Structures are given as C-alpha cells and as structure tokens.
Amino acid sequence: MSELLKIENLHVTVGDKELLHGINLVLETGKVHVIMGVNGAGKSTLLHAIMGNPIYKITAGRIFFEGQDITELSVDKRAKLGVFLSFQSPVAVAGITMENFIRTARTMVTGKQQKIFAFKKLLKERMSDLDMDISYAERYLNDGFSGGERKKSEILQLRLLEPKLAMLDETDSGLDVDAVRIVSKNISEYHNQNNSILIVTHLNQILQFIKPDVVHILIDGKIVKEGGAELVDEVAQNGFDAYRPAGKGDGDNGQ
Amino acid sequence: MGEIAINRLPVHTYRYLKTNDTKIIFSGPQSSVTAKFSDEEYVTKGATFPNNFEGASEETLAAALAGEQYTITIPPNVEAKITITIKLVDSSSSYAGGFHFLLQKGAKLALVWHWTGLANTGDNCVAAYYELEAAAELNISKLQAKLRDATLCDQRFYQIDKNAKAKCVSAELGGKQVIVHSRGNLLGNEASLVEETIYAGVGKQKLDLFYHVDHWGKKTKSIIECKGALAGEAKKIFRGTINFRRGCTGASGTESDYAVQLSSKAKNISLPLLLCTEDDVEGNHATSAGQIDEEHIYYLMSRGFSQEEARRIVVEALMRPIIDSLDPSLREQALEEIRKKLDAKGE
Amino acid sequence: MVSMLIVLLGKVMAIMGNDEKKKSDIGDVTRSIYDIKDKVEYAFKADTGLTEEIIREISAQKDEPDWMLKKRLEALKIYNKLDIPPWMPDISELDMTHIDTYVRPRTDMKDSWEDLPQNIRDTFDRLGIPEAEKTSLAGVGAQYDSEVVYHNVQEELSKQGVIYVDFETAVKKYENLIKPVFGTLIPPSYHKFAALHYAAWSGGSFVYVPKGVQVSMPLQSYFRLNAPGAGQFEHTLIIVEEGASCHFIEGCSAPRYNVANLHAGAVELFVRKGAKLRYSTIENWSKNMYNLNTKRSLVEEEGSMTWVSGSFGSHTSCLYPDTILKGDRSTCEFTGITFAGAGQFLDTGSKVECIGKETTATVHSKSISKGGGTAIYRGVVHIGPKAQGAKVAISCESLMLDNASRSDTIPDIIIENDNVDIGHEAKIGRIPDENIYYLMTRGLSEEDAKAMLVRGFAEPISKELPLEYAVEMNRLIDLEFEGSIG
C-alpha cells in the first residue's frame, strides 16, 4: 500500500475567513475514505483545496500527491496527475457538447489524442452503464440538465478520465433512490486497488453501496475523529453532538 | 428662454431617431414658494455645488440654482429623518431650489420629498447634490402627484465614497412634463446606488427619465429600475447608462425598464446603455414592454374580478415592490393616485 | 464539404510550413495565406480623388446606360453635401482624395476557370475556390479589384430561370428588373457613404430567383482587394420572388497595406411574399480596412429574412444590417458575432423596423473584445403605430477578455403601439471564473479553457455558418489564445 494523498497541517482561507484550521490526512491507494460533518464544516472546502481552486487560499501546510508536493500546482496540472473532483453543483457550459468536452478532457488528461469513433463507442458504453440516454452526448454540457442528470454527467466523466484519486462532493444529494444505486454501482465498478476514492456526504445514502475503509469527522474546520466504517452507524444513531466542542449550538444532525 | 435640449445621452446614436436628447420649451421658474423642512436642525441657508454637476441641461441646472439654496449637513454617525414639502399653492406659483446634502462619515439620513399642490402651470426646477462620505447611508423617498399642468425638473447628483449607500425610490405620478436627471459617481470601493422609479402616464403626460451611473471603485453596485404604465397619449423615454470604468473590478450593475402599455396611442422609448472598459464586472439590462399578460387577467376574472379591476390589480402588482419601498408616509397616497389614474385612463 | 475542407486545410499547412514560428498576434498568422501581394499590373487606373470627371470616366468605361450615369452624378452631389455622422467611429485617417476608386485587372469576364490569367488563378487557388466550385456550390461570382473576373452559373440554375450574374452585366442585360428597384431600398441620401457608393459603385452581384424556385445550393461570392489604395464599392442586389428561397454567402478577404483601404458596398435585398432569403457573411478584412458597408432588406407579407454575420477583421467597421418588416406576418432573424482585437474598432449592430401587422423579429448578437479592441453593439427596434401584434426578442451578450478593451451596448427601442410584445436583454462580463476552474479540473490549461469557453460562446453563430467559415472562426479564436502563455 502506498500513500496516494498526504495533507499536512492545512490551513485554508476564503476571503478573510479561515475555514480549515490545520487538517492532517493520509489516503492510501486502493482505499475508500469518507469525510462526514455538519453543513458548513468545511468538507467541500477541503476537496476544492485539494483540487486547487484559486478562491481557497492555502495559508499554511502542504499537500502531497504520490509523494510530490502539489501545493503550488495549478488546477489543470493536478488533473493531469490524476486528481478528479465530482462537483456538488457542476456548472453548465452552453455551446460545448458533452461528447466534445469529455473527449477533449480525456485527451488532456491521458496526453493521447482520442480517436473520434473509438471514443464515441466508449462513451456510449459508459452512458448506458449510467442509464443515460445517448442523446445527452449531443447536448450542451450540463445545460438544462436536472440535478440528478448533472451528477450522472460527473460520474460519466469520472469513468472516462480514469483518475487515481476520485473526490466525490455530495454526489448522492439530490438523487432519487434508483439514481443513487446506479451512480454508486458505477463508482464501485471504477474502484480498484490502483485508485482511491474520497467521499464527502452528509446524507450517507451513497454509503449503503460503497463501504468506506476510513471515516473522518470534520467539525468547524478540524478533523475531530477518525475511525473505521463503524463510525458511520454511530453518527447515524447519535448525530455529531459527541464530537462538537462543548457549548456549541445545534446544527444539522447528519441524518 | 426658448427651446433647449435636455437629458443628452453620454454616447450618441443615430440622429434620425431624434432620441439622443429631448427638445423642450423652457422659460424657467420664478421661485415664488419656499420648501418646508420637517426638521431644521441640520439645515443652513446657502450652498456650494461642484463643477461636475451637469443637471438635465445647463439651463435647467442654472434655473434651479438661481432659486433658494440650502445645505443640509448630517454629522458623523448621526441618524436623521427629514421631510421636505414643496407645495405649489396656486396655478401661478413655481419653485426653484438647490440643495446640498452632506452626509459625513457613517451618517444616516432618511429623506422624504413631497411635491403637492393643485393645477399648476409653471416650470419647476430642483437640483440636489448628495455627497456621501465613507459608510454614509441615504434613503430617499419621493412622491410627486397631481400638479396636472406643471413641468417638474428633478436633477440629482450623487458622489458616493467607500462603503456608502444611496437609495432613491420615486413615484412620478403628477406633472405634465416630468424630467428626471439622475447622475451618480460610485467613487469609493463598495459604494452603491439604487434608483427605483414608478410612473403612471395618462392623458398627454410626458416623462423624460435619465439615469447615469459611473462605476469607479471596486465592487461597486448599481441598480436602476423603472416600472410603469402608459395610457392615453402619454409618452415616456427612458435613458439609462451604466458605465464600468477601467479598474472597477468586481462591480455589478443592473438596469431594467418595464412598461405596460394600456392604449394604442401611448409612446414608449427605451435606451438602456451599457458601457464597459473593465472585464471583471457583471452588467445586465433588461427592457420589456407590452400589454398585460392575458393569462393573469383570465386568472383574476375566474376569481370574480371584472376585467377593469383585473387590469388595475395587475398593473398595481407590477409596481407594488417599489411602492412598498417608499417611506410609509407616502405609500397610501401613491397607491391612491395610481388607482385614480388607472381608472380614469384618459383614453 | 469535408473533402473540400481537408484540401483547403492542406493548402494552408503547405503554405505555412513547419518552421513557421508561432506568432501571438492573430493578424500575423492568419493573414499569411491571404497576404499575397501579387505584382500589380493594371490596364487602366482612374485619377485619384472623387470628381465628376472621374465618375463620367468610370461610367464610360463600363459602357453604362444613361440612367445609371445620371444616378451616379446625382449621388456625387449628395455626397458632397452630407456630413459624416458625428457618432460614428473616427475615420479621419481616411482621405478620399487619395483612394483610387476604380482599378480593372488585365482581363475581361471569363466563363471558365482555365481561361483566366495565371496570377489571378493562383490567388483564387489559394483561397480554395476551384474546389468550392466543384463540390457543393452552385456558382461563384468572384471579384478581383473592382471587376468581376470569373463567373460561372451552373446549368441547373439557368434552367430554373435563376439569374446570378455580375452587376455590370446585369445593369445592361436585366434593366427591366433592376431599374425599378436599384437605389430604392438604400437611397443615396441614406448617409454619406451610401452616396459615395452610388457615385462610384463597381462590381457586385445580381441574383434573381423566380416565383416558387427553391435554390438548394448556397450561392457564394468572394471579394478581394489587391491594389494599394483601392476602394471597393460593389453593389449586391437580390430579388427573391413569391414563394421562392435562396441562401447567399458573402465572404471576403484583403491583403494588408499601409495605405488605408475602404469598403463602402451596398446590399439591397428584396424578399417578396412568402419568400425566404438567408444572407451569411464573414467579414475578415485585413487590419487596415475601413469597412462601411450598408445592408438593407425589405420583407413582404409572410416573407422571411435570416442574417448570419461574423465580423472579425478590418481596422474600423460600421455595419448595421437593417430589416424592414413591411408585410404582415413577415419575420426576420439576425445572428451575429463581432470579435474586436487589438487596434480594432468594430461598431456593429442590427436594425429592425416593424411596419406590418403581426411581425416577428429575433436578434442574437454576441461580441468579444480583447487586447484593447473596441466592440460596440448599436441597435434599433422601431415598432410603428400600425404594427399591431409585433413580437420582438433581442439578446446581446458581450464578453470582455481583459480590462484593456472596451464593449458598449447602445440600444434604441421605440414603441408606438400597445399591442406588442418586446423583450430586450443585454449582458456584459467576462468568462466566469467557475467555468474556467471547472474546465481546468478536467485537465485543460487556463488558456485552453478560455479558448474553449469562447468557442462555446460563439457557437450559436458558428453553427449557422458554412463549415469552412465555422472552422476558420474557431481557428481565429484559438489563435487569439495561443500567444498568451509565457
């Protein structure tokens, strides 16, 4: 087992507010990690900081990917190294078809020019795996897509870009039961010994289908507890109260 | 005087359309009445005005400044409320006045302008210079109603420093020839200006509404919103300009002009300009004009309202959000005036 | 189409060569295929400057009927009386006394490609015309320095009674069709450069589509300026009779010179009852051109007019395609894009005049400003008092790619009756950061992401254009971004 991702003492600020106060995290290849916490805890912030979103400024700490320090690296260079983020609210980009976009992205990330017909065939297969109508390939990227369709579009990209680290930001929110099942199935199929998955969820629906190896609980910008899959059930039963700093008021109970 | 040109566009377009400016006959007010202040604590006589106050035209600005002049200074961090009433008592009275409002750092002023009177045929001109220092807040509510044959020229000029906010909500319901010239400079970072106007033009009313905001500071914000109804042979022209100057990163500006046309002879002209030399901004404008949506009328009628009542309700609903922004002391009267005008319609 | 495209691209690569250093100024790279300054040989050259003598000379050279000479002289009088509109972009560098108005190359009209002089054939060869002619286009009227040199109308068109001929010939041969309408839609008094046009016009196309005829292949026309100081004043007149339909493509190019070049053409389009006309243009003039073109369309009952317009080149442009919806239930659609780069001042827009009842108009205008360029949208919508039931929707989107450039939107909306439905919206801004970020998370570099997003922005227009133009347009956009790194 090797270290795929290592985060050391990460402090992240947005505007003039610090959202993450010294995060430490290690992700090994082949594992599934889950980050849980109440709304506003900083879970999405962490994923975006790993991806390199310039809005999130790293004021202290380092991020290592396969041993390489990527803290200063631009977003696209991280993508090319094999980091992938499935967005919570993917933007719509009118004027660019899904097929064209994903084919270009795959060319970028693999470094190999994609052949049109071979790619089309592969795209069709993967869309059928996700129960996505083939007509979506011709539609503008995420334009006019429902929330569920956008999430599927993200997972479709995941399967076609084949990253080493797949970060899933609230992929299960906004999906109905069938959609969650099919999306989870695709993620499971994708997961193997050579890649890792980092899941952020506060509804836990996705965890019915994908078993985590490590669970982190993030409260107020700090990781307050780490454990195995049993933590999921514990939080489902008792909420996050046990992990909150004393005296803090009510938030979301993570149910 | 004679014929003058008012409300000239900052950037001209085709001349044959004759919309670059408006030509009117103007003879200037005699200034026979005085403005009444609800509270004179911060008011002193006399005022100075900056050179870059343009007004609707040189002539109308000079006419306003030739009348009585006041300076209203709100000291730092003080909150004040002032109502200014201008009552045109008879058909021959007219008003001219220049006002310099200085809101010092952190000052807050709620200002109400109330124009009222009977049938009046004069030319009336006001010029108000609003100078807002850092973090000052200004809320203006204006109502002008009745004054069937008067010319009302309202010229305002804002210089807004950082974090200061100015908002002006006007109900332009009276007058025969209504001229509004509003010009704002958002100088400091996060300065903002909101201009909301409602109107109901009937008979032979002419409304000439001009707004121009220059964004200089970063993250400055402007909203120009104009809503109204046109009936009879009323004519309205809206000239709005939002100018994003280089360096105003993060600024946002929105202009909208919505008009409901209730008669076939009413004339509606809209020139919503967006000028821009800065890329990191968001500029939007939207204009729409037309009849009332038949769907809405049908729905209301299915609930028992007559067609006339339904029309009135829909038009009122369009203007309601702005009416609700008016100072409470003006709301009832504004609503009443609108209802009266829409009932009469002057078709 | 695809095979032609591949051949065209092949030619481009061959000419550019492998050791061509990548230049960051778009002008330098794309112009190379067009900047072929053939050694200019002229048979006849008019005196510079615009005098009555010169106009008479031009008319005599063309052996024109009297009525045309009369129109020219009247126009010259109007030209001298009118002033330059003050709101126009600055054209003070244009000195009319030093622009040759008429230059005729050393050949007469040819019917077949092979008969043309070699250097002229070479020029058009590089622009890919023979392939175009062979594969999908019906006929090509190609203009080379104020005269239409090569012309060929396909047999099928002739059989259908479709006329597609150079304008000089048309004036003599089809006087009965042209004389009643010539100069009526765009009168010489329209503005100073329309007057100039009517005094000095030369070249252009005449298209006549008889009743009920559907021209299935697009008609294409090329313009070309080659002589230093040559002005282009071609006149295009298209009549689409009742129930007929036609697609006309106008695309132009010019080499770059130090002396200001002027293009003051006029396009008069008559769309009769129930007829359909589609007019596509890519204006890609070189960076020293003054492009003051006037286009107007008159649409009768139930007729439909579609404009597709891409403005990329020229130093200064004034371009406002105008549609008069005269007939009841007439419609028009305008889709256009303007890309103003460094040193360019592109003032474009659209005009719609609703006169008949129940007319419909849709305008989608997009503009991009970069590197100090200025893009202006100047629009007019005028709904007349009798235009009951008019429906107009306008949307203008301006993309600013940096803060050195300028983008202005100046719409003028005049509504004179109550039974209308008008919506106008405009947006100014830059490429949203979250869109750039999203594309970068999929491995595209920042510049590649921006280029892709700008292509996406332009896509509604490029998909309306013929393929080779769409490819050209995307190439222009890509090249604008290539030089920006490092």
Image: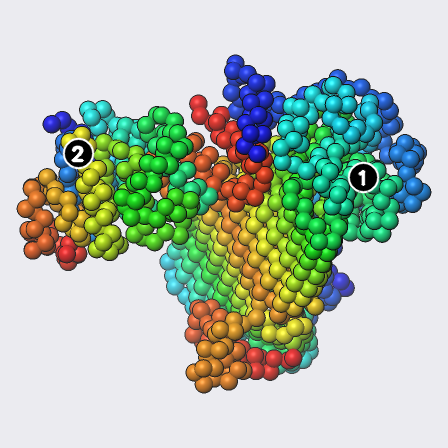
Q: Position of residue C282 (x, y in %)?
A: 63, 38
Considering depth in this image, is C462 or C450 the residue closer to the camera?
C462
Q: Marks 2 and 1, Cα distance to the nearest angstrom?
A: 71 Å
Q: Of residues B7 and B316, which is closer to you in this image? A: B316
Residue at image point 51% right, 85% down: B306
Residue A252: tell me if it is visible: yes
- In percent of width and height, residue C313 lies at 63, 33
Image side of residue B37 versus residue A111, left or right: right
Chain ID of residue with mark 2: A
**Three-letter amino acid code of the residue under disc 2:** Asn
The residue indicated by pointer 1 is C167
x%, y% of residue B40?
47, 69
Residue found at x 68% / y 38%: C138
Q: Quadrant of the N terminus of chain B?
A: bottom right
B91 vs C418, nearest the viewer: C418
Residue at horizontal 60 percent and vertical 74 percent from the top:
B262
Determine the residue positioned at 67% across, 32% down: C133
Q: Secondary structure at mark 2?
A: loop
| Residue A78 drawn above or below residue C199 | above
Whether the residues at callouts 2 and 1 have beta carbons within 8 Å, the answer is no
Q: Which mark is residue A192?
A: 2
Corner quadrant of residue B176: bottom right
Q: Callout 1: residue from which chain?
A: C
Q: Nearer the viewer, residue B186 or B341?
A: B341
Give the crowd class for mark 1: few <14, some 14-19, many >=20 residues within 10 Å. many
Name the colour scheme: rainbow
